[in-house]
Amino acid sequence: MKDKQKQQKLPGPKTISIHHGKSFSEETGCVMPPIFATSTFVHGNKGEFDYTRSGNPNFQILERILKRIEDAKFCTAFNSGISAVTAIASSLKSGDKILCESNLYGCTVRLFEEVFKKFGINIFYIDFTSKGYKEAILKINPNLIWIESPTNPLLKILNISEICKIANDNKIDVVVDNTFSTALIQKPLELGATISMMSTTKFINGHSDALGGAVLTNNKEWNQKMIFAQKSLGLNPSPFDSWLITRGLKTLPLRIKEQTQNAENIVEELSSNSLILKLIYPYNTSHPQYDLAKAQMKMGGSIITMQLDLNKEKTFRFCKNLKYFSLAESLGGIESLICHPATMTHASIDKTTKTKLGIDDSLVRLSIGCEDYDDLITDILIALKDI
Ligand SMILES: Cc1ncc(COP(=O)(O)O)c(C=O)c1O
């Protein structure tokens, strides 16, 4: 009985994602929220809304669900993942330092290098899985550490709690880009991060029909900075996109489970394929940080990266042979996608850096969807055979 009462007080992620927006049924009887397509609000309203750039019921609903799923005190929604990155980085001042993981999403790197550097922000990169990374943090002494885990596209697993411990001991804030995992797989704030940010375009929405981003934190000052950035930089999402993302979010737990199961089955089937030189998946025993992935992540997720034993031309032929995996940017939707990071998501990174990181022309990233497993694996096997 006691356990049951406890469960009622603490609903699970499926219940939260379905029920924990705001209900408008008292006034109208509607089960789902309407789209508040309004730029402005009459002053003195109960919700204290004044202008959609600084707040709208549709993004407030989304923010509430996201912070409940992540157990965070605060959440601010943005119009894309890159807007969320912009909001955080623009809170720094000239002379400040960001220490980044060497393998970050290409457009985050481009934003730091080509925009924020111009405003005097210093950007450093290290491999956070290397032996000397702790000394490097202390030597550089940055204002902010910026990491992803798993990283895009190499799926390196970083020890988030170990990194946060060193950072917290030295009063350094840590941002974890949790786009690939979402709170259903790992909760960076619980592991000690100052900020958990994500592109809600991907798994959170899950239907590849809207762009969005979110920043979650338990830190009051950072929350104030995010609210300021949302309205002052015009980074707010649209009511319609927020409505779409809120709707997609309702099935996040179901989608993640199904996609992960498909991914695990695909990894198992492909692990002995002679055309695949490296099959990278966090829950694959061959992954260099397998033990850490098992300890840090609740599931292995649904992104698989493969290094093929093929040249560039044949790698593209394989991508184009696929029937159910469209060759497209993005990930995390119900539909399977394949991406060629070197010429797509990481095209803006110079070739020498890419080669050093291991993002070469034979590397492909698969985002596994909710289709039937048999159809997906048959598709991959036929596409490999027909190159
Ligand atoms: C890890 C990661 N962070 C941030 C972003 C940027 O998100 P958006 O495309 O919504 O701006 C992406 C996009 O692919 C990503 O993969």
Image (cartoon, rainbow, N blue to C red):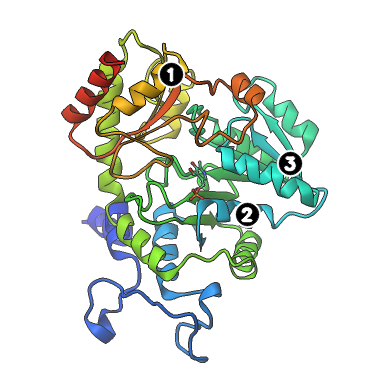
Question: Which comes sooner in the sequence, label 2 or label 3?
Answer: 2
Q: Mark 1 points at which residue?
A: 313
Q: Name the residue under label 3.
A: 170
Q: Are marks 2 and 3 in contact (CB under 8 Å)?
A: no
**As drawn, 25 above or below 302:** below
Residue 311 on image: x %, y %: 45, 14
Q: Report crowding for label 1: few under 14, some 14 to 19, many 20 or more residues within 10 A (C-alpha).
A: few
Instruction: Give the side of residue 83 with respect to residue 89, left or right.
Output: left
Secondary structure under the numbered disc 1 in the rendered image:
helix
Residue 73 on image: x %, y %: 51, 61
Instruction: Identify the residue at horizontal 53%, vertical 44% (top origin).
Output: 177
Q: Which mark is residue 86?
A: 2
Calculate the distance from the C-alpha at mark 1 to the C-alpha at mark 3: 48 Å
Image quadrant in which the C terminus is located: top left
The reply to whether residue 234 is visible in this rendering is: yes
Q: Residue furthest top?
A: 274
Instruction: Identify the residue at horizontal 55%, vertical 31% (top origin).
Output: 159
